[in-house]
Amino acid sequence: MVDIDAAIGYVVAHGDAVERARLSYLRAGSRPSESVLERIDSGQTAAGGWPAGGDRDVPSVDATCFRLAELDDLGDLDGEHIDKALAWLASVQRPDGSWQEDAALAAEAPAWAMPGDPEATLYLSSVAGFWMSVAELEAHPHHEAPARHADTLARAAAFVAGQLRPDGTWPSFLAAGWHAAGLLNEAQFFYESARVQLVLGDRLGDMSAADVANMAAALRRVNLGDDWLLRSARKRLGETQRTDGGWDSDEGPIFDVNITLTAIRACR
């Protein structure tokens, strides 16, 4: 079992102001101070996306999705700033339903966001489609109104489904899998989503703690029906939690608080 109290204590002891605000929302639904939200919102470009770095003015698909995830942890995935971000993502979707980073970012882009690379294209398309789906769920949790970007999401899901291999695997990074599963589920590609989930379940034992936390935190945002994969992931998180309450990040100790928050979100 995951020791949530120990995880909370780790974040309180080692987290910064934004991370502690994320914890307060995850624990008690406490809305963060305006200063915390302004630290994130102030980086949004006039176009609606966020840049990959604070001193750049070219919006990034990857960075924008990261900010949407961060705002989701703060209970702030609705409002004019989110509308602008979703509109920007919709505006830069390619005709085939995919997303790629602006070519101007190629010199500094990580492998998973490299413009023109097929693996990066599938990853970004899965992530962008996933977070647009989650934002629509936040605005209309019971699907009581049509999605604001229904055509964008339909094209995204069709593109991602078309990239799946017959055995349910995908020609991209591991993280593309769980984002694809969520996107496809929300777009009612239930069979395709289930195939991806089966592959993720088979890989669970070899995943890092960070990957398990990220997968579970993402998939708990959509209604998968049978949550066998989430139950298995939470069990794995209990096995990989450190004695100090935290989990190891794949990017080094400086990101351990962030992945611990992600694990807490996965187990809420």
Image (spheres, helix red, strand yellow):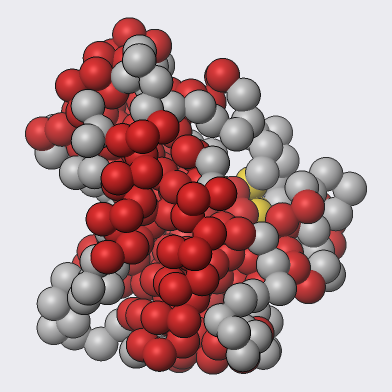
Image quarter (top left, top right, bottom left or bottom right) of the N terminus: top left
User: Residue at the location (41% across, 32% down)?
Assistant: 240
**In the rendered view, does 30 fall on the left or right side of 83?**
left
Image height of 5 relative to 265, above or below: above
Q: Nearer the viewer, residue 66 or 171?
A: 171
Instruction: Locate residue 20, reporting x and y percent.
Output: 30, 22
Q: Nearer the viewer, residue 127 or 81?
A: 127
Instruction: Locate residue 68, reporting x and y percent.
Output: 43, 52
Image height of 75 relative to 22, above or below: below
**In the rendered view, does 50 fall on the left or right side of 118?**
left
Image height of 12 relative to 125, above or below: above
The reply to whether residue 52 is visible in this rendering is yes
Image quarter (top left, top right, bottom left or bottom right) of the C terminus: top left
Q: Nearer the viewer, residue 146 or 202?
A: 202
The reply to whether residue 148 is visible in this rendering is no
Q: Kindly give the residue lying farthest to the top in the view shown.
A: 13
Image height of 158 relative to 116, above or below: below
**In the rendered view, does 234 fall on the left or right side of 101?**
left
Instruction: Locate residue 24, reporting x and y percent.
Output: 20, 28
User: Residue at the location (43% across, 72% down)?
Assistant: 197
Q: Kindly give the residue lying farthest to the right in the view shown.
A: 107
User: Residue at the location (36% across, 34% down)?
Assistant: 239
User: Residue at the location (44% across, 73% down)?
Assistant: 198
